[in-house]
Amino acid sequence: MSNLLELDIEFRFFTAPIALGLAVFGWYGPKWLGRFRWVALGVAMPMAIPLALSGMYVVYKWPLERTLDHDEIVAGEPLYAGSRIRFRDSEHTRIEFIKLPRVTDISGIPFIGTVRFASGRDNPARWYGTLAADQTIDGWPCAGGKITTRWGNKPNKLLMCQLATAHAFFDFELPASTTVYYGDTYRRIDTYIDTWHLELPPDKGIAIKALSTTAPAGVALWVTAEGCLQKIGLREGQTIIARGVPLRANIEVVGDVVVGEIAESFVVAGEQRPAGTKVSIDLAAGSTSLAGSR
C-alpha cells in the first residue's frame, strides 16, 4: 500500500492536474454534454482519492523522514549527504530504511541503493539490501546483489547471500551461485542448532560424501555449523541414490540413519515395496528397513 502511495506522490504533478481538470469539466461543463460530464467525474474521483490518501500519508510520514544535507553519523552509522532516512519513531532513534546516494558502508558492509533494517522478537536484528561488490563476509565469498546480515556483530554474521565463487564447506564443495541462508533449527526443548540452508544453482549438482552419492542440481541442503548433513530437499521428479536405494522428496539424516521415501518400487526387508514407502537406511550397518520398524 505504501509503495503505491509513494508512486502517486512521485507522479502527482501529472495526475493532480488531470484529476482537477476532469472534475472541473464534469462539474461546470455545458449541460448539453450530458453523460460525458458524469463520465469525467467518474474518472476524476478514483484519481483524486489516491492523491488525497497520499497527501495524508505524506503528512503522517513526514516527521519520520530526513534527508541529510551533510555527512553525518545517524543511529551509529556514518552516512553521506543526500541519504534519505525513514525512522520508525519520532525521536529518530530506530531506522526503517535508508535510500543511499552512493556506495555506503553499513556495519562494515558496502551497500548500494536502499538498505532496510528489521528486527523482531523471534528474529535477529538485521540489515538487508544490495551488496555493492563481491566481498567475503563471515568466511563466505558473497556475490554483489541481495544480502542479509545480522546487525551488531563484529565481524558481521551472514544471514543470506549468493556465492560469488566455489566454496568448500566441510565435505561439501559448493558451486558458485549457491544461495546460503543461516538459521536456528529447533531440535529439543530449549536447544537450537546453528544450521545453514544451502540452495544449489539449477545447473550444478554436488557430491554428498556421507551418502556416497551425488545430489542433482537445484536441491536444497540443511547442514549444521559443524558440517553435519541434516536434510536434503529434492524437487519434484528428482531422485538420489543413497547406498543403492533410490530416494525422493525430503530426506532426513539423523546421525548414521537416513530416512526418506523410495522413488520407485524397490525391495525392502525382503519384500517388493511400492514407490512412496518410507524407509530407513542404516549407514553404519549398510541395511535398509521400513521406517519405524527398527
Image (cartoon, helix red, strand yellow):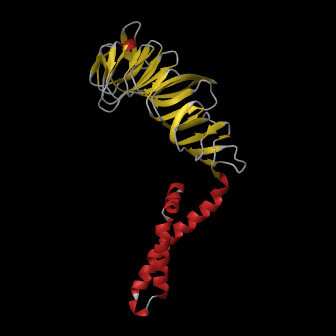
Location of residue 118 with respect to 184 vertically, above or below:
below
Front-most of residues 188 and 208: 208
**Residue 253 at x, y percent in the picture:** 44, 18
Residue at position x 73%, y 48% in the image: 91
Left or right of 266 in this view: 132: right
Front-most of residues 162 and 15: 15
Front-most of residues 79 and 193: 79
Q: Is residue 119 visible?
A: no
Q: Is residue 141 visible?
A: yes
**Residue 237 at x, y percent in the picture:** 29, 31
Residue at position x 69%, y 47% in the image: 92
Image quarter hosting the C terminus = top left
**Residue 213 at x, y percent in the picture:** 33, 15
Left or right of 239 in this view: 59: right
As drawn, the residue found furthest toward the right would be 91
Q: Quadrant of residue 22?
A: bottom left
Location of residue 201 with respect to 81 vertically, above or below:
above
